[in-house]
Amino acid sequence: MLKRICAIITALIITMTLTACTNPFDPDRPQLNTIKEICELETLTVKCNDVVIGTKDAGEGWKHLLETDRDYWIEYTGVVEMGVNAEDTNIEVKDDRVYITLPKAQVLDVHVEPGSITEDSIYISDDSFFNKNKISADEQTEMVKEAQEQLRDTFEKDEEIKTETTQATKNAIENYVNKLGESFDVKYEIIWK
């Protein structure tokens, strides 16, 4: 039993040694595997002050007698983050050439800036004295969600902003590759696919 354990351990050590010896890492050449992280970091953030306007109509039927239509608006700051999806980026290094496939920029996230909705940023018209037509927090939240989706759609359709974001990402990658190459005395040629 002890001989089997020793044989297994010896086999593992030999396998690890052979694997380590075939590692393609070259300490004299820079490693470009962090480019995908740059793609994730290089984003365009746009803050938009927006106002959501809504109306809650009075209900129908005898239960809603003397109810009035109510107008309301909510002012908030929407944040749109544009960038390149790093998962769709492909990098191949062959000698001194770096082949990079970079997808087009897209909307990565849309959210309400925390703290931008306060009591002062919500207006609701007066309610009927006799029969209330309440506007719930859920209805207000749904209006803001719909506004965020409209904001997302607007930026998804804006080809100029997407092109600018893609170019900014390319510039950051080129700068990174050139600086890294300089530190190792390697002049890389970047080829965009």
Image (tube, rainbow, N blue to C red):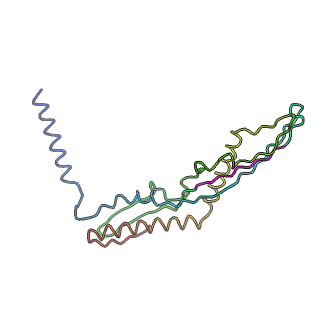
**From what the image shows, is residue 114 above or below residue 158?**
above
Point 58% across, 52% down: residue: 110
**From what the image shows, is residue 131 above or below residue 170?**
above
Is residue 72 located in the magenta-colored stretch of the structure? yes
In the figure, is residue 157 to the left or right of 26?
Answer: right
Point 57% across, 60% down: residue: 46
**From which residue to which does the magenta span run?**
69-79
Location of the C terminus by quadrant is: bottom left
In the figure, is residue 168 to the left or right of 148?
Answer: left
Location of the N terminus by quadrant is: top left
Point 79% across, 43% down: residue: 56
Point 18% across, 53% down: residue: 21
Rendering coords of residue 101 (x, y %): 44, 63
Rendering coords of residue 10 (x, y %): 13, 39
Extreme residue toward the front, this view: 120
Which of the 4 quarters of the picture holds residue 152? Answer: bottom right
Q: Main secondary structure of the magenta part?
A: strand
